Image (cartoon, rainbow, N blue to C red):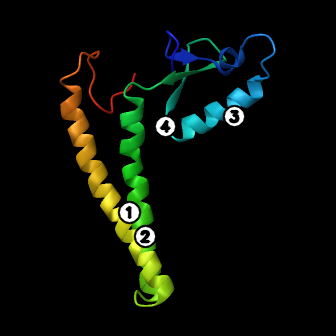
Amino acid sequence: MSGESAEKSAAEGAVRGPGDRDTEAAVSGAVNYLTQVSMVGREREPGSRRDRYRLHNEIWYTTFAGRDQVLTRWERTLKDGARTLGEHTPAGARIAETAAFFEFLQSELEGLMGRWEEHRKTLDLPAGRPGAST
């Protein structure tokens, strides 16, 4: 994230100074995870067999915005669980409270993301829109 280039291969990511123990396999595993959670994108240069990984623009905005779907799924599952257990049972009440927390968190996150979009416009940052990637 702090390098000049927003892209590297897994092998380039493993290159460190003397004494560091990062291996290409370990970096590759980390990159696979980051790809799964949409924090990096996988690309391949024409004619090359080596994958390159690019950090998305607005990486943190995109990451948090994507959590909206996860929170919705958890909230729905928790509400179903509370109904199944009975919302007035001790276990059902705990599950219902957790569902209410996720519902609250999601509504706050939506407002927060909107406020960030407005705040970002006031900053001297490179052009781009929240959620855009390159």
In the displayed structure image, the side of residue 20 where residue 104 appears, left or right: left
Judged left or right of residue 131, residue 93 is: right
Tell me the number on the disc at residue 98. 2
Q: Name the residue under label 1.
A: 102
- Residue 11: image x %, image y %? 70, 17
Task: Name the residue that disc number 3 marks.
Answer: 29
Q: Where does the C terminus fall, quadrant-wise?
A: top left
Distance from label 1 to label 4 (Cα)?
A: 22 Å
Q: Which amino acid does label 1 sit on?
A: Phe
Whole-number angstrom distance, CA of label 2 to CA of label 3: 32 Å
Q: In which quarter of the image is residue 10?
A: top right
Say which amino acid is labelled 2.
Answer: Thr
- Above/below status of 55 relative to 86: above
Q: Which of marks 1 and 3 is nearer the N terminus?
A: 3
Q: Is residue 32 left or right of residue 90?
A: right
- Tell me if residue 115 comes above or below residue 96 in the rendering: above
Residue on which the image places disc 4: 38
Disc number for residue 45: none
Q: Where is residue 83 in the image (x, y as percent from the top left)?
A: 41, 84
User: In the rendered structure, are the residues bearing label 2 and label 1 in contact, judged by CB atoms less than 8 Å apart?
Assistant: yes
Given the image, on which type of amino acid does mark 4 rest? Ser
The residue positioned 74% from the left and 10% from the top of the image is 17
Question: Of the residues under marks 1 and 4, which one precedes in the sequence?
Answer: 4
